[in-house]
Amino acid sequence: MLVCKNCFSDKELKGFIISSGHISECGYCKNRDIETIHLEELFDFFKELFDNFQVKDDGERLISKIQGNWNLFSDIGIGNRIMNYVIGNIDTHLQNSEELVDFNNDILDNVNYWHVLKEQLKWERRYLTDINYLTELGWDSFFESKIIINKDDYFYRARLHHISDEDAYSNDKMYCPPKEISTAGRANPKGIPYLYLSENEDTVLYETRASYLDEVSTGHYPTKCVS
């Protein structure tokens, strides 16, 4: 069965038909003298597309799910006819274009965890120390940039004094501020205090915006090894 570029709204499919097709009459929309291909050439594409779904009694119609997410077809009626022809001629667990479906569990796991992660990043933490689950989801490619911290590394922090001739701050005052007075920073939201450190002692002086004759307390922090 021949299908033409006007049966689809998707730009990539239309482009594929224009570049690979030949001028003929479409078997679906009946347009004449238009770029067409044999629908069989798209079977692999539809097979991969259908594999993203599972049958669900309380789901959404397959055609509506596809149109709502990708606007694949130029017309619902044409979309139904194309999909039913494909479903009847490939190996798929789906029965027809009106079947009730939802995304498969892998996709749902990704979507659901993204909502959880988004709320955590907004309200609880900005750094992830356990990325095992992200690796299971296949998100590890997002974390290709890595910094290795060795057990002998030291880090630094500085605090500007607001009173002249003040004693150096004690250890307990050189950590992150209490959550009650913690303001939003580069990595932390308001109310979730983070300890900002640098591997360079000079950098922490610049971070405090210290100027000539300002008094500053600096602290150095060894790496805590966790086995």
Image: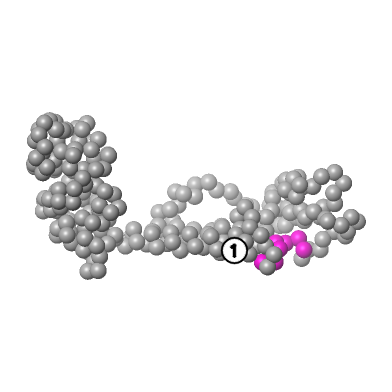
Q: Position of residue 140 (x, y in %)?
A: 45, 52
The answer to whether one can see residue 2 in this image is no
Q: Position of residue 94 (x, y in %)?
A: 17, 59
The answer to whether one can see residue 163 in this image is yes
Residue lying at the far right of the rendered structure? 165
Q: Residue at x 40, y 57 (%)?
A: 137
Q: Residue at x 59, y 50 (%)?
A: 148
* Above or below: residue 46 compared with residue 125: above
Q: Residue at x 12, y 42 (%)?
A: 29
Q: Position of residue 200 (x, y in %)?
A: 72, 46
Question: What's the magenta region?
Answer: 173-179
Relative to 37, 172 lies left or right: right
Q: Residue at x 9, y 40 (%)?
A: 30
Residue 67 shown in magenta: no
* Above or below: residue 107 compared with residue 29: below
| Residue that badge 1 annotates | 227
